[in-house]
Image (tube, rainbow, N blue to C red):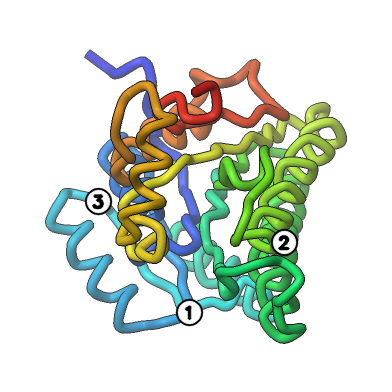
Amino acid sequence: MTSWINVEGKVAIVTGGSRGIGESIAKALGQSGAKVAIASRKKDGLDAAAERLRKEGVTVEAFTCHTGKPDDVQRLFQQVIAAFGKVDVLVNNAATNLHFGPIMTVEDAAFDKTIEVNVKGYFYTSRELVRHLVERNAPGAIVNVTSVAGLTAAPLQGVYGMTKAAVVSMTQTMAAELGSSGIRVNAIAPGLVDTRFAATLVQNKEIVERVVGRTPIGRYGQPDEIAGAALYLASDAASFLTGQTIVVDGGMTIG
């Protein structure tokens, strides 16, 4: 019996796919029938993740790419298409957070780099997928990993939150403009998740207690708990869903 939520026959690119939420999403997509390309800036981490994913039964290839560089993004798509023949799904997950502190104290270099990766990177990869899909006259799906930091005030993470709010806006506008082409664009806003990326927060007892105290489920999340939402949004089960941001935060934003 075929699972109702599956991505059989699809090819997916997952940026920031070498660890954490990205690797978990790649595993969910691959175990549900997709061929997966994981992309990140560091080859060693990619190769290790690809090996772990293959042991989980995932058909995967790894590609180095700095998503904030348009030439890198174009090369990524050329390589993935050469390897798998096409791309149907893009999961924008690569992100950075270089400043933890009051927003007015951020240095220009950290501000610019955060914008480059978290906003320009999502735009460049989305643009390249859309060009490819339009050329093929094919439908497709973009899943943007944003954050609850982009939905509310984000003290001590102001620039990061700003970029994630931009991703929510980008998701809505692209969905409105691309819907008639059969291209769906949605986002996931995780709450606090136990990843190396969020180590500054997860290892801070005061922050964890404050977050967990506001979270009805009573804990922070794990990467695999974000992957199910991405799988759904990438699949045809979500064929009538676009322009939305699904909050996966244990109820924190209602607490």
Q: In the image, residue 36 lies at what x, y percent?
A: 39, 54
Secondary structure at numbered mark 2: helix
| Mark 1 and mark 2: Cα distance apart in space | 16 Å
Position of residue 87 measured from the top left corner of the image (x, y, whole percent): 55, 51
Which residue does the image show at 24% across and 51% down from the upper left?
58
Q: Amino acid at mark 3?
A: Val
Dots 1, 3 in contact, CB < 8 A: no
Earlier residue among tags 1 and 3? 1
Residue 134 percent across, percent down from the top left:
77, 46
Task: Choose between 17 and 239: the one closer to the eye.
Answer: 17
Q: Quadrant of residue 187?
A: top right
With 197 as the anchor, is 244 left or right in this view? Answer: right
Label 2 neighbour load within 10 Å: few <14, some 14-19, many 20+? many
Q: Count neighbours of disc 3 (C-alpha within 10 A) and say few if under 14, some if 14 to 19, many if 20 or more.
A: many
Q: Amino acid at mark 1?
A: Arg
Q: What is the number of the mark on residue 41?
A: 1
Residue to which mark 2 is pinned: 119
